[in-house]
Amino acid sequence: MLHRVVITGIGALTPVGHDVPTFWKNVVNGQGGAATISHFDASLFRTQLACELKNFDASHYLSHADLKRTDLFTQYALIAADQAIKDAGFDLNKMDPFDVGVIWGSGQGGMDTFEEQVTEYVKGNGQPRFSPFFVPKLIVNMASGMISIRHGYMGINYTTVSACATSNTAIMDAFTYIRLGKAKIIVTGGSEAPITPASVGGFSAMKAMTTRNNDPATASRPFDVHRDGFVMGEGAGALVLEEYEHAVARGATIYGEVTGAAMTADAYHMTSTHPEGLGALKAMQLALDEAKTDIKSVDYLNVHATSTPVGDLSEIKAILKLTGNEKTKLQISATKSITGHLLGAAGAIEAIICLLSMRDSVIPPTINTTELDPAIPTHLNIVLKEAIPANVAITMSNTFGFGGHNGIVVFQKV
C-alpha cells in the first residue's frame, strides 16, 4: 500500500525575508534581494554582488553553544527547520520518535568553516591550529544530524547532495520514505552558506555568475537577452512532510500534497545542462506520470532558470518538447530573479513558493527581464514584472545541478 504524502509545515530564511510571511510578501511583490557583497571585500573579484541575508544575527535564534559548534549552513538549517516544525504543530510526546526523520540537503556544507580553518593553518606556518569542531562543522550531513538532536527525532536521518538539485532530491526522498510507510513525518529541505571568498571566487572563475556589479538589483534576469550569469544567494528552506491520514487525524493544516517526483541525469557535461534539455524533459515527464497528470493540467511551473545564457534556453527547449510546442494554460516564473540562486537550498524555497501559490491563488513574477530572448516563443506564458491572480491547483518545481542532476517535484492542492 502506498501512502499519500502532504506538507504540514514550512519555514524560510532567505535574502528577502527571515520568515515565511515576509519572504512570501516580497516574492509576490517582486522585491529582489541582490546587493554588493558585504560578507567580505569582493572589490577585486569579477563578481561583487550576491543575495545575502539582511540584518541577520544567528544569536537571536540559537544559543552560544550551538553557534560555537555549527557552521552557518547548519545554523540556517536549524532556524528554518524550527519555523517549519512550529508551523506543523505536532507533539512528539504523542508519537514514537522513530516515526519522525530528517532528510536535509546542502550542496557545499561548511564552506565558511573550511576556509577559516585552513587559513588559520597557513597563518601558523604549518603548525596545527585546527578546532576540535572543524570536522563536525564542516561535514555536509551535520545539518540533518543537528535538527534531529535538537528535536529528538530518531527516525531516518541523512543528507542529500546533488548540487543545485539537492533540495528537490531531499524532498523526493522524504516523499518516497513516507509513501512506503517507513516514516510518519520527515523534516526536509536544504540550506546553503556559500557567500565566501573561495565559493564566490570559484563560481566567478567559471564565468557562471553575473558581472553586472554596477547594478546588482537587476543583475538576475532570467530569459532576458542580456543575461550573463546567476546571482548567488544564501539561506534555507524547510518543509514538514507527513503521511496524509496521520495529518488529518491530528487536524493539521495542509499546504498541499506531493504527488510526483523524479530524477534523471544529463550524462553530458560537468557543469552545462544538455543543450536540448533531454534529461530535464525526461525528469519532468516521469514526475508528471507518477502524479497521474500531464503538463496541460499544470497551472504553475517554477523553473530552475538561473539567468545563464545556456541553461535558461535548454530548460525552455525541454518545456516546449513537453508541451508539444503548443500554447497551454501553464504559467511560468523564475523566482531566482528575486531571491538569487541558493544552490542546494533553492529547491526548498521554490517548493514553498509553489505551495503558497496554490494557497493564495497567485503566481509570483520574474523580475528584471526587460527584453525577452528572441529564441523563446511568445506563446509561452512567462509571468514578467508583476504577480498575477490565478486558480492554481497543480504546480511543478524544476531544479538542475552541476554533474547533470535533474530533480523535479509535483505538488497538488488538497
Image (cartoon, rainbow, N blue to C red):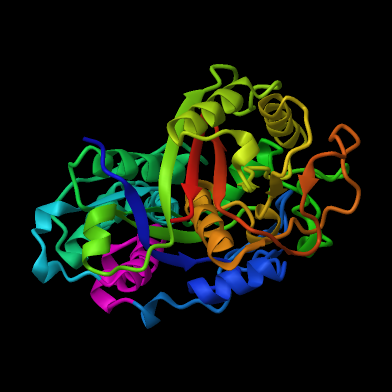
Q: Is residue 218 magenta?
A: no
Quarter residue 267 falls in:
top right
Where residue 185 sits in the image (x, y, percent)? 24, 55
Q: Which quadrant does the C terminus fall into?
A: bottom left
Where residue 250 sits in the image (x, y, percent)? 22, 68
Who's the residue at 10% across and 68% down the image?
A: 94
Q: Nearer the viewer, residue 154 or 283?
A: 283
Q: How many marks?
A: 0
Q: Is residue 162 above or below residue 394?
A: above
Range drawn in magenta: 62-89
Q: Nearer the viewer, residue 74 or 14?
A: 14
Our reading of the magenta stretch's main secondary structure is: helix
Q: Nearer the viewer, residue 339 or 67?
A: 339
Who's the residue at 78% across and 55% down the image?
A: 219
Q: Is residue 88 magenta?
A: yes
Where residue 270 sits in the image (x, y, percent)? 57, 24
Q: Which quadrant does the N terminus fall into?
A: top left
Q: Is residue 217 above or below residue 307?
A: below
Where residue 305 sits in the image (x, y, percent)? 68, 43
Left or right: 65, with 12 as reference point:
left
The single residue placed furthest to the bottom in the displayed view is 60
Could you tell me if residue 126 is visible in this image? Answer: yes
Who's the residue at 73% across and 37% down the image?
A: 312
Q: Is residue 59 above or below residue 169?
A: below
Could you tell me if residue 107 is visible in this image? Answer: no
